[in-house]
Amino acid sequence: MAPRKLKEGVFSVGAIDWDRRLFDSLIPLPLGTSYNAYLIQGENRTALLDTVEPALIKDLFANLDELGVKKIDYVVSHHAEQDHSGSIPAVLERFPGARVVTNQKCADLLASHLRVPAAACDIIADGAVLDLGGKSLQFTFAPWVHWPETMFSFAREDKILFTCDFFGSHFATGTLYADDEHHVYLSAKRYYAEIMMPFRGKYPAYLQKVEAMAPEIIAPSHGPIYRRPQFILDAYKDWTSDKVKNEALVAYVSMHGSTKLMVDRLVDRLVAHGVNVKQFDLATIDIGELAMALVDAATLVLATPTVLNGPHPAAVYAAYLAGVIKPKLRHAVLIGSQAWGGKTVDTLKGLLAGLKLEMFDPLMTRGLPTAGDLAAVDKLAETIQARHAALA
Ligand code: FEO
């Protein structure tokens, strides 16, 4: 993708990864992604803000060539992860005088992960300003907007805030700006759920800092750029708030149909009671969809048959994922089936224990659910509805 101008002397020079379908061997990318890098040309100095995934370095270099860039003075590294900093060694080789401008933690990670020598780095403090001549960058440390070393930089004269992973979306598009807010919202929410949600508690303070800067543009390092920053700020305020919605996430896997009968009955009753249900078959799900649904849900229903002596592995994965991405769930219940016994409930409870949820009594059938089992499911639906009503 050719370089694109944001403002006079400010260009998007990164790469679009249209075909990538898995990130970190973990996260599905149904819409691909991008690795946004930015070039800022001051009167005296030129800065490159982040680089790209090494596999696409040719795209970054082609953009710099197209702009006629012969010298880079600074490579600002907001985050040491390889999708943004992995090409720093190649950039330093091509532009030998360039200095890597970053914080100490990031320099340490660049050294251990990418063998960027400490001698190539200029260490900046929180709040420091880098003068480019007529343009300047001010740095704000923002640990855990993905890793502990992450930071933002603010182009003060142009009022552009560069946030790296924060506010990003895995969304490959030839459109520079996030003007199609409906589609960008969904990609940004998925990204938040998968990458950012574990550190949710830190973000209200960061959002206040961002609003105080009053950026005209927020330029993340994945996905489109926001020229209406309030759109993504409002979305993050909602996602990071402590408020849950009247939603039950029903994640199930069924082998011979017994667990599915329980799920069908519960979903029917929940809907009848006015609870918004998001139902997913864990055998076929895109795990990002599950993560997205966990952003808002008040209750998790995890349904599984018993395999050998414990839960189906798909249910284990879902419980583990919920445990590590730390959603703001309030309640959970385990339902399912077993033939003769097992430790299904104990195993899943253990995986969810860190979330400190109210766990409703589990409902496990022996084979096909009986009329008594289904009556218990009806009761469970009433309990969930009552809890949700109390949250309103
Ligand atoms: Fe886009 Fe945490 O790297």
Image: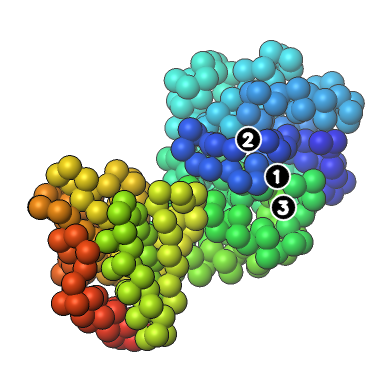
Q: Is mark 3 within 8 Å of ligand 1?
A: no
Q: Residue shown at 28%/61% (left/top)?
A: 259
Q: Are marks 3 and 1 in contact (CB under 8 Å)?
A: no
**Disc assigned to residue 31:** none
**SS for tag 2?**
loop
Please state, as top left, top right, bottom left or bottom right, where the C terminus lies in the image: bottom left
Name the residue that disc number 1 marks: 172
Can residue 153 be seen at all in this image of the molecule? no
Q: Who is closer to the viewer here, 300 or 344? A: 344
Q: Is residue 78 left or right of residue 219?
A: left
Label 2 neighbour load within 10 Å: few <14, some 14-19, many 20+: some
Q: Are marks 1 and 2 in contact (CB under 8 Å)?
A: yes
Decide which of 342, 63 is in the foreground and name it: 342
Q: Mark 3 highlights which residue?
A: 225
Residue under pointer 2: 20
Query: Which scheme is used to colour this image of the protein?
Result: rainbow
Tally of numbered discs: 3
Label 1 or label 2, whichever comes before in sequence order: 2
Secondary structure beneath dot 3 equals loop
Residue 15 percent across, percent down from the top left? 73, 34
Q: Position of residue 242 (x, y in %)?
A: 39, 70
Q: Which residue shows up at 77% across the image and 54% down it? A: 177
Q: Is residue 134 above or below residue 156?
A: above
Q: Name which residue type carries label 3.
A: Ile
Measure how far apart labels 1 and 2 are at the Cα level. Answer: 9 Å
Viewer-proximal residue among 241 and 250: 250
Q: Amino acid at mark 2?
A: Arg
For ligand 1, tell me if the residue under mark 1 lies within 8 Å. no
